[in-house]
């Protein structure tokens, strides 16, 4: 069974990669019908859920349903690093970028000397984080919480972390046993967290124009700015009677920060003013609902438009 698919182009080939249930990552050159490489991921780290290629096509990252992220060198076909995400949740989506640290984007020019590889990992409770691939340090995190103080998700936890796991078999098994292996069922890939980020797309490193767009199981599409909370907003999924969310930025130090979205819950019918409650008998012809009714599974840019698809079997184009 194929669990993840990715495609990328090089100067002389078009490579399709796909991960199987047995932990193998196969490749297929679409121009010559050959297999350039075949990688074997550690099966004790779980089933593969997501893959992403580096900007230079020389390295790749692989995420599993147990929260592990593996860094592969495609030139030598070797695993270079293995991390475990502190959330210990399935890695829903991965992306990569080769840019300077995000704290240097605003008000400064693009300096290639400061550029380094970054990994975007969407996992845990409605959260997406940006990690330095060379050190595993979390540079920026985008998180959504609820207003209610009684909700467990309302507390502001620290930034997520990547704990490096030894690659040797004996050391790796000892580390996994000390942390707990967690669940290893294939069904955990499909049954993700009730509120999780399932897809990410954006533009990074372009000074004041850097942004990230996320879509998740809460049927909402959020636009995140990397530095200005006033530029962040929710573009789909807010009900007419629901209060607008608020965004804020929390700086932990000069190398890490958290972009937080506080999402108010939908009010009960008894709490809404009767004049704002729609009356079914006097609605007339109802317009087609613009938001998705189920979790968003993927996002893509097409020229100046954003395309989203959902579990409700709909594809929408946003201008």
Image (tube, helix red, strand yellow):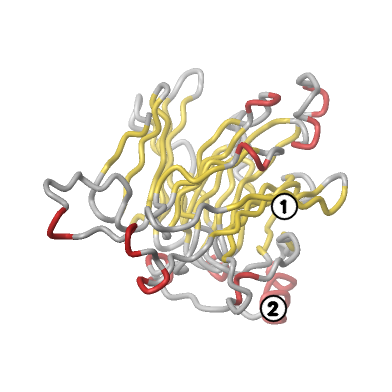
Instruction: Give the residue at the far right of this rendering.
Output: 254
Circle 2 residue: 179
Instruction: Give the residue at the far front of this rendering.
Output: 275
Q: Position of residue 131 (x, y in %)?
A: 71, 48
Q: Earlier in the sequence, mark 1 or mark 2?
A: 2
* Residue 79 seen in render: no
The label nearer to you, 1 versus 2, is 1
The residue at the point 42 percent across, 23 percent down is: 304
* Residue 149 seen in render: yes
Label 1 and label 2: CA atoms lie apart by 26 Å
Left or right of 287 on screen, residue 148: right
Q: How many marks?
A: 2
Mark 1: secondary structure: strand
Left or right of 20 on screen, residue 211: right
Q: Position of residue 112 (x, y in %)?
A: 77, 22
The residue at the point 12 percent across, 46 percent down is: 285
From this view, report whether residue 149 is shown above or below residue 218: below
Q: Nearer the viewer, residue 311 or 188?
A: 311
Quadrant the C terminus occupies: top left
From this view, report whether residue 2 is shown above or below residue 270: above
Mark 2: secondary structure: helix
The residue at the point 57 percent across, 64 percent down is: 124
Please tell me how crowded label 1 is: few (under 14), some (14-19), or many (20+) other residues with Cα within 10 Å: many
From this view, report whether residue 50 is shown above or below residue 115: below
Circle 1 residue: 258
Q: Position of residue 103 (x, y in %)?
A: 79, 37
Left or right of 226 on screen, residue 298: left
């Amino acid at each position: 069974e194929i669990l993840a698919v990715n495609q990328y182009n090089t100067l002389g080939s078009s490579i399709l990669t796909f991960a199987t249930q047995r932990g193998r990552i196969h490749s297929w050159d679409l121009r010559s019908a050959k297999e350039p490489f075949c990688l074997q991921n550690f099966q004790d780290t779980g089933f593969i859920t997501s893959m992403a290629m580096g900007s230079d096509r020389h390295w790749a990252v692989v995420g599993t349903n147990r929260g592990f992220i593996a860094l592969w060198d495609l030139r030598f076909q070797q695993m270079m690093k293995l991390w475990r995400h502190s959330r210990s949740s399935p890695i829903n989506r991965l992306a990569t970028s080769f840019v300077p640290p995000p704290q240097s984007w605003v008000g400064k020019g693009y300096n290639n000397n400061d550029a380094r590889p970054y990994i975007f990992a969407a996992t845990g409770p409605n959260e997406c984080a940006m990690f330095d691939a060379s050190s595993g340090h979390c540079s920026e995190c985008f998180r959504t919480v609820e207003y209610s103080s009684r909700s467990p998700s309302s507390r502001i936890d620290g930034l997520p972390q990547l704990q490096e796991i030894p690659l040797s078999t004996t050391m790796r098994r000892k580390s996994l046993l000390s942390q707990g292996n967690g669940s290893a069922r294939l069904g955990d890939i499909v049954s993700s967290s009730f509120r999780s980020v399932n897809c990410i797309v954006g533009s990074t490193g372009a000074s004041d124009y850097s942004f990230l767009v996320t879509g998740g199981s809460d049927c909402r599409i959020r636009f995140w700015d990397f530095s200005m909370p006033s530029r962040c907003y929710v573009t789909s999924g807010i009900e007419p009677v629901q209060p607008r969310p608020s965004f804020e930025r929390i700086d932990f130090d000069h190398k890490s920060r958290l972009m937080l979205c506080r999402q108010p819950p939908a009010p009960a019918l008894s709490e809404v003013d009767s004049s704002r409650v729609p009356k079914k008998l006097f609605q007339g012809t109802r317009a087609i609902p613009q938001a998705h009714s189920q979790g968003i599974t993927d996002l893509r840019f097409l020229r100046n438009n954003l395309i989203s698809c959902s579990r409700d079997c709909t594809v929408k184009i946003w201008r």
